[in-house]
Image: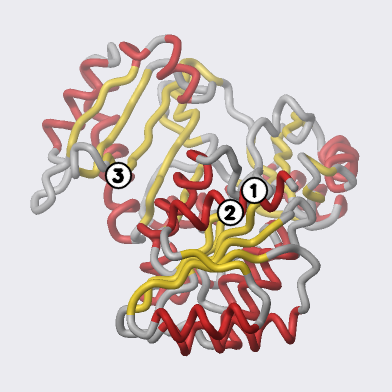
Amino acid sequence: MKIHEYQARAIFARFGLPVVEGDVATTAQEARAIAQRLGRAVVVKAQVHVGGRGKAGGIRLAHSPQEAEEVAGQILRMELKGIPVRRVLVAEAVEIGREFYLGVVLDRSARRVVVMASAEGGIEIEAVAREKPEAIVRAAADPFLGLREYQARALAFAMGLKDRQALSFAPIATTLYRVFVENDATLAEINPLVLTKGGEWRALDSKMLLDDSALPRHPDLESLRDPDTEDPAEVQARANDISYVKLDGEIGCMVNGAGLAMSTMDTIKLYGGAPANFLDIGGGARAEKVAAALRIILSDPSVKAVLFNIFGGITRCDEVARGIVAALEEVRPAVPMVARLVGTNEEEGRRILVQARMLTAESMAEAARKVVEVIRG
């Protein structure tokens, strides 16, 4: 789950990280009041879940409350990558001495939480990793002991920090690690983390991604979700307990099981097709859930055919087939359907679907080939 910068900033502040003073505004007048309260130059930043805000004009400097009001009004009338800006963060401007990057991520290959830092802050870390990978230093935290103080100091020394600067950087790194772990995040990032000309550390940008699966443990974080900035199909999928990710292809996929869904998409690609989505309907595919999944798939205008790939283990294939038929009667799709059912009562399940005039297949390869052939006419 993505959260806005101002929300991540509030979490960082609660843990004692050196965020800049500021507040969020939904109107130009509120932005003026915040700038007046801060009593100095401010940065007005669009709060949307997209990158490249600065290049698109979504981050502006204002030297007075009046200018902050004008700038905020302009930003609040913008759309960034099709998403309307409804909030701005008004934060104090600081005199930057040096810019750094500091982030915490889960490194699946290392099976550890990894803290990354770079003296090349202020730009996209992906660009640094691609063009100058030696500029990124890493420390893997111990699963039981966490990120130790000596590891944080080693990161500082590797970035060229010395003496007091290195010592003052270390608690920031260990605190950001705590933020990551205690909030079940998948990313916690400060970019840039700056040393001001006065020698103080300031977090100028705060970013967090949260693990959806852990949100039941954090009801306070669940409330930070902004449905206005999410894809309507993904919102509908979450409401129906369906795992869904939109892709760029033209073959809609409805599968029970994440691994099977990935294999299905790979097989479609093998036969020359392109999947339009990842969709894991989970176990016990009842008619209501199948219908909800179909509505989500068919809401994508690029979908030209749908492939069902269901493995009936505990769930019986004939029950799944009846659910599919009931869903088709409700949704009444205008695109062709191909279904592959295998497992308990698969013959009966296929018979039900054949009676409903659906194309069926006995293997995943056959199903993928058929659905690609259907699209090609």
Q: Name which residue lies at 79% across and 30% down.
A: 57
Q: CA distance from mark 3 to mark 1?
A: 41 Å
Residue 295: image location, x then y, percent: 70, 72
Mark before the other along the chain sequence, 2 or 3: 3
Q: CA distance from mark 2 to mark 1?
A: 5 Å
The x, y position of residue 251, in whole percent, is: 64, 53
Tell whether label 1 touches label 2 (CB within 8 Å): yes
Which tag, 3 or 1, sits closer to the chain's start? 3
The relative height of residue 12 versus residue 136 in the rendered view (above or below) is below
Q: Which type of secondary structure does the marked residue at label 2 adopt?
A: helix
At horizontal 21% and vertical 17% (from top left) the residue drawn is 157
Crowding at label 1, few (<14), some or many (≥20) Cα neighbours within 10 Å?
Answer: few
Q: Position of 142 compared to 237: left or right?
A: left
Residue at 40 percent across and 10 percent down: it is 132
Position above or below: 244 against 157 = below
Q: Which residue is mark 3?
A: 106
Can residue 19 be seen in this snapshot?
yes
Q: Which residue is mark 1?
A: 373
Q: Position of residue 107 (x, y in %)?
A: 27, 39
In the figure, is residue 157 to the left or right of 182?
left
Residue 32's place in the image compared with 154, above or below, is below
Q: Residues within 10 Å of mark 2 (few under 14, many from 20)?
A: many
Which residue occupies 70% across, 40% down? 45
Q: Secondary structure at mark 3?
A: strand
> What kind of element bears circle 1?
helix
| Residue to which mark 2 is pinned | 370
Residue 43 image offset from top left, x and y in percent: 70, 35
The residue type indicated by label 3 comes to Leu
Task: Give the residue type that dot 2 points to.
Answer: Lys
Residue type indicated by callout 1: Glu
